[in-house]
């Protein structure tokens, strides 16, 4: 039997072993460890780095990849407010064509711009092998800074040579640039050869981490590649880690994107408004649109301006939103296949030949057209672009459409019909100088397919009604002003910081001027577009008022032709339509209510109709319709 002394010795031994095990688990790190995660901190702190026993830690603070030439970690790093550090990358003038002129519009910041601290570290083990690089971003003292409220914040980190090296840097003119011809700038190059590795860390409006991932990065856009700042595409690939997607629901749609974009606005570089605005208003249309999230970006620790974080049209996008197999997609963009395939070219050319050469004045041929393209998708897309004044780089350029390669018997979106996708409406649209632009004629002069389809009376009817829906509802003041006000409430302060950074003090007036210009376009565009559709489509009727009223805005909705009516606070709406074509109305009750019928006044007394859907001719003096909803 064990004596008391032996039992005590055994107990002490067990306690000692447990203590050693605890010590071992705390100090024998199996990977590189940072004592603090990326994020926002109100006070300075010490950052401790730990690695496996016998390993040596190397770190950098400028975004460069740590190797044997980096700083050697010997003691905790003090992470403080970094904004007072000297500007480095922000002072470069080899990043935009604008800097080549004598008095550039861009201004180099003459003050310390906001910064975060970037720590990149790796360890070298006892055999001399380096571990994977770990990257963290620390924002200290941002709690009282302006320009960051209610926007996402992204830290983009990459070795500076990937951006600014004259031979491989994607953000600069580079050593091959021909100034006389303005050709061969590094930032103008495309393709995988000009993709560079990067680490991105995205923080939400609550400053909590949404996404932290290694990925590929490229410059995005056309002519805007010469601007500052530039738009960027990010690609999730297995060669940067194990992920082929960005594993975060960035747009609250359930979509895990394989490619995302930080768009600087393209040619809409001041307000960064047009793409988001038109896409937001067009969500109910039969073409694809992107989702947009406001974002402030820091590049290797330096403030790099305001962007929209948005989706990119890829096979993964189409698979998520339309339920098509991502291996069964053909996409045409800028009149080119996104992926070369001889059979796909054949399908595309066949479609274009059909659209341009078929006699659609024959009703049977026009009916067959609906099996080749999604007609409402085409009409919605072209009517939208025409209404907002798109011209300079559209149609053809900045036009995209897709279809399923193999037709499925299950139907749905794998029916083999072509459908359209909205993007890049920031070059020539929504401007006062375009209020009187006859973009119907512009499209007729630049699209043989559109001109040929206009031979169909049914097409002209469908197009006219859709275009007038856009004029009366989609782009009405009642529908657009809330979007503009929400944008200004959200972006005014962030864009103030942005414009000061890139254009100097007192630049916010440029934003005010551009939004005023958009408002002026929206206020005055409708009568001109109505005049042009009447002229080009040979309409003989007159524009008359259609008034619609609802007994309760919360009890149900009313759709006029192709758009849901936006009622005012009194439940009233009015618009103008040509008497050449009847309009359709449909009503849908919300839960707890039912639709009780229509009250129609053509100027000869009230008529009651119970059907939820009806078609109405417009008399010479207009028409009044009331949707009656009642509680169950």
Image (spheres, grey):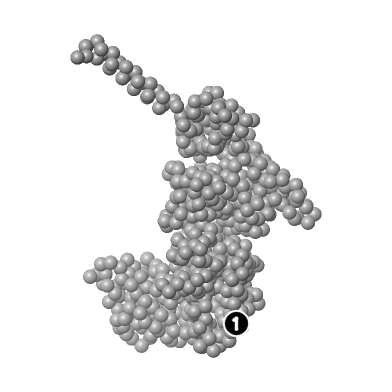
Q: Nearer the viewer, residue 215 or 273?
A: 215
| Residue beneath the point at 57% across and 33% down | 130
| Residue beneath the point at 80% across and 54% down | 180
- Image quadrant for the C terminus? bottom left
Q: Position of residue 200 (x, y in %)?
A: 53, 44
| Residue beneath the point at 67% across and 51% down | 187
- Image quadrant for the N terminus? top left
Q: Position of residue 570 (x, y in %)?
A: 36, 68
Task: Give above or below for 310 relative to 409.
Answer: above
Element type where label 1 sits in the image:
helix
State the residue lying farthest toward the right: 180
Task: Give above or below for 554 relative to 549.
Answer: above
Q: Examine the rendering and report whether any part of residue 431 can be seen.
A: no
Q: Nearer the viewer, residue 312 or 83?
A: 312
Task: Give above or below for 241 relative to 551.
Answer: above
| Residue beneath the point at 41% across and 68% down | 566
For disc 1, the neighbor class at 10 Å (few under 14, some 14 to 19, many from 20) is some
Q: Image check: 494 left or right of 162?
A: left
Residue of label 1: 452
Q: Nearer the viewer, residue 253 or 86?
A: 253
In which quarter of the view is residue 298 placed? Answer: top right
């Amino acid at each position: 039997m064990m004596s008391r002394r032996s039992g005590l010795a055994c107990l002490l031994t067990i306690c000692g072993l447990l203590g050693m095990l605890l010590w071992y688990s705390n100090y024998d790190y199996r990977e590189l460890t940072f004592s603090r995660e990326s994020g926002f901190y109100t006070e300075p702190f010490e950052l401790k780095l730990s690695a496996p026993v016998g390993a040596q830690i190397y770190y950098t603070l400028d975004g460069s990849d740590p190797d044997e030439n980096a700083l050697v970690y010997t003691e905790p790093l003090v992470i403080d407010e970094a904004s007072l550090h000297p500007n480095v990358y922000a002072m470069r003038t080899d990043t935009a064509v604008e800097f080549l002129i004598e008095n550039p519009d861009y201004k180099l910041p003459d003050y310390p711009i906001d910064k975060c601290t970037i720590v990149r570290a790796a360890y070298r083990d006892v055999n001399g092998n380096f571990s994977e690089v770990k990257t963290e971003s620390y924002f200290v003292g941002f709690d009282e800074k302006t320009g960051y409220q209610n926007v996402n914040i992204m830290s983009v980190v990459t070795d500076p040579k990937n951006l600014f090296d004259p031979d491989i840097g994607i953000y600069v003119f580079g050593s091959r640039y021909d100034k006389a011809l303005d050709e061969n700038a590094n930032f103008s190059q495309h393709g995988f050869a000009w993709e560079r590795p990067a680490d991105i860390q995205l923080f939400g409006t609550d400053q909590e981490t949404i996404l932290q991932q290694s990925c590929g990065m490229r410059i995005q856009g056309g002519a805007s590649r010469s601007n500052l700042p530039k738009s960027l595409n990010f690609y999730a690939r297995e060669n940067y880690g194990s992920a082929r997607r960005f594993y975060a629901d960035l747009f609250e749609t359930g979509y895990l994107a394989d490619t995302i974009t930080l768009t600087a606005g393209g040619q809409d570089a001041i307000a960064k408004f047009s793409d988001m605005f038109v896409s937001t208003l067009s969500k109910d249309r039969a073409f694809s649109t992107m989702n947009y999230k406001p974002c402030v970006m820091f590049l290797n620790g330096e403030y790099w301006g305001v962007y929209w974080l948005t989706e990119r049209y890829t096979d993964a996008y189409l698979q998520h939103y339309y339920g098509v197999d991502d291996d069964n997609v053909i996409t045409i963009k800028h009149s080119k296949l996104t992926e070369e395939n001889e059979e796909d070219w054949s399908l595309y050319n066949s479609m274009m030949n059909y659209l341009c050469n078929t006699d659609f004045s024959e009703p049977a041929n026009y009916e067959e057209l609906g099996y080749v393209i999604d007609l409402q998708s085409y009409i919605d897309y072209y009517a939208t672009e025409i209404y907002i004044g798109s011209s300079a780089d559209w149609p053809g350029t900045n036009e995209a459409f897709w279809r399923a390669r193999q037709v499925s018997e299950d139907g749905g979106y794998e029916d083999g019909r072509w459908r359209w996708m909205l993007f890049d409406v920031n070059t020539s649209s929504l401007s006062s100088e375009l209020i009187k632009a006859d973009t119907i004629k512009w499209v007729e002069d630049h699209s043989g397919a559109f001109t040929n389809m206009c031979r169909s009376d049914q097409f002209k009817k469908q197009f006219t009604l859709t275009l007038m829906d856009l004029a009366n509802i989609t782009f009405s003041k009642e529908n657009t002003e809330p979007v503009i006000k929400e944008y200004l409430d959200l972006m005014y302060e962030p864009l103030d910081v942005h414009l000061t950074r890139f254009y100097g003090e007192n630049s916010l007036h440029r934003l005010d001027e551009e939004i005023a210009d958009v408002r002026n376009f929206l206020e005055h565009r409708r009568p001109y577009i109505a005049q042009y559709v009447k002229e080009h489509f040979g309409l003989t009727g007159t524009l008359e008022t259609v008034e619609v009223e609802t007994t309760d805005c919360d009890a149900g909705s009313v759709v006029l032709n192709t758009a849901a009516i936006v009622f005012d606070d009194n439940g009233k709406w009015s618009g103008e339509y040509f008497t050449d074509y009847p309009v359709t109305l449909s009503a849908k009750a919300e839960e707890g209510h039912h639709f009780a019928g229509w009250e129609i006044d053509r100027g000869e007394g009230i008529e009651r109709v119970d059907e939820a859907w009806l078609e109405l001719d417009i008399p010479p003096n207009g028409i009044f319709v009331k949707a009656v909803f009642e509680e169950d």
